């Protein structure tokens, strides 16, 4: 018998962690998304003031701009290019939204992280990856983990994985927010890099609000078994088909 879910991304695993039941409804039964209830203001699911610029669309637009950024000779896009990128997502940004997009790219262009990427021996952006996990309790059945890294930079000392984050920090520490919301992603990225043969990997979550304060974590080849065990533990409920409601129910 096939696993209930045999292919999983880090976003799927994070969604399962937040609420196994919602994960089952979306990924197992494939129920269509619905508009969030009025007044709940679920982050990323409701457009701001009719412009169509949800948090998800905002992040997608700036990721597209950074994907095309020349790290060695960074040129910040002008208003016309910003509008063109936004139109790809069917939105017409307000002046303040254009300024926000411009500022995020400008901060990256002037950051030490951009300089570090520019100095790397090889740089690839929007790079897909996949690797398999074989849970010892799954009777030989495997789980395919897949995803995309924003930047993979090969350096003389090792591998650098960079993930751009457009989240509003609201005064929070980048490392604290990363540990709270992106620990699973960090784990998957690190294991993917080590599985590809890297002896040393740094995973950097770069919040575009403060790109000179990245949340960094470093791993070496000897960490691979431990990381795999942690990932298998996080995915165990998916493998076993235990899709339980969140302990902290909410509209999301």
Image: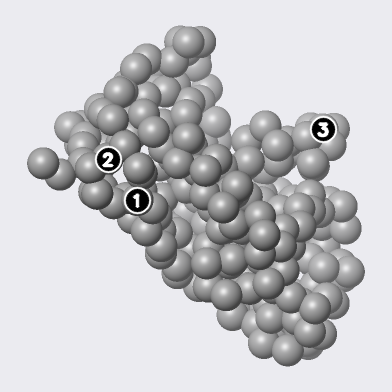
The residue that disc 3 covers is 172
What residue sits right under mark 2 in the picture?
Answer: 138
The mark found on residue 134 in the picture is 1
Q: Are marks 1 and 2 in contact (CB under 8 Å)?
A: yes
User: Which image quarter: residue 124?
Assistant: bottom right
Q: Position of residue 239 (x, y in %)?
A: 30, 36
Please tell me which residue lies in front, 54 or 229: 229
Render colour scheme: one colour
Q: Work out whether 37 lies above or below 62.
A: above
Helix, strand or loop at label 1? It is loop
| Residue 31 picture location, percent across and down | 20, 32
Looking at the rendered image, the quarter that the N terminus falls into is top left
**Residue pictured at 24% horizontal, 49% vertical:** 140
Q: Position of residue 106 (x, y in %)?
A: 80, 66
Q: Is residue 82 left or right of residue 50?
A: right
Mark 1 against mark 3, which lies toward the viewer? 1
Q: Does residue 32 appear in the picture of this structure?
A: no
Tell me: residue 146, above or below residue 16.
below
Label 2 Cα crowd, 10 Å radius (few <14 / some 14-19 / many 20+):
some
Element type at mark 3: loop
Q: Nearer the viewer, mark 2 or mark 3?
A: 2
From the viewer's perspective, tell me whether residue 184 is left or right of residue 46: right
Q: Is residue 31 visible?
A: yes
């Amino acid at each position: 018998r096939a696993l209930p879910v045999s292919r999983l991304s880090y976003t799927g695993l994070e969604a399962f962690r937040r609420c196994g039941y919602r994960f089952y409804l979306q990924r197992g039964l494939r129920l269509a998304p619905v508009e969030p209830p009025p007044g709940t203001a679920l982050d990323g699911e409701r457009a701001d003031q009719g412009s169509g610029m949800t948090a998800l669309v905002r992040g997608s637009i700036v990721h597209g701009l950074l994907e095309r950024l020349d790290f060695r000779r960074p040129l910040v896009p002008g208003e016309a290019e910003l509008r063109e990128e936004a139109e790809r997502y069917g939105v017409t940004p307000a002046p303040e939204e254009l300024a926000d997009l411009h500022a995020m790219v400008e901060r990256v262009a002037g950051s030490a992280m951009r300089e570090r990427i520019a100095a790397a021996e090889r740089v690839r952006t929007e790079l897909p990856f996949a690797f398999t996990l074989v849970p010892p309790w799954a009777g030989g059945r495997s789980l395919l983990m897949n995803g995309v890294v924003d930047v993979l930079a090969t350096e003389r000392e090792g591998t650098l994985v960079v993930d751009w984050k457009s989240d509003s920090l609201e005064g929070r520490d980048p490392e604290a927010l990363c540990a709270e919301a992106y620990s699973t992603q960090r784990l998957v990225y690190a294991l993917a890099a080590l599985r590809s043969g890297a002896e040393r990997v740094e995973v950097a979550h770069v919040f575009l609000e403060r790109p000179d304060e990245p949340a960094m974590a470093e791993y070496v080849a000897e960490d691979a078994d431990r990381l795999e065990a942690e990932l298998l533990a996080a995915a165990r409920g998916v493998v076993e088909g235990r899709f339980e409601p969140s302990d902290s129910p909410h509209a999301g």
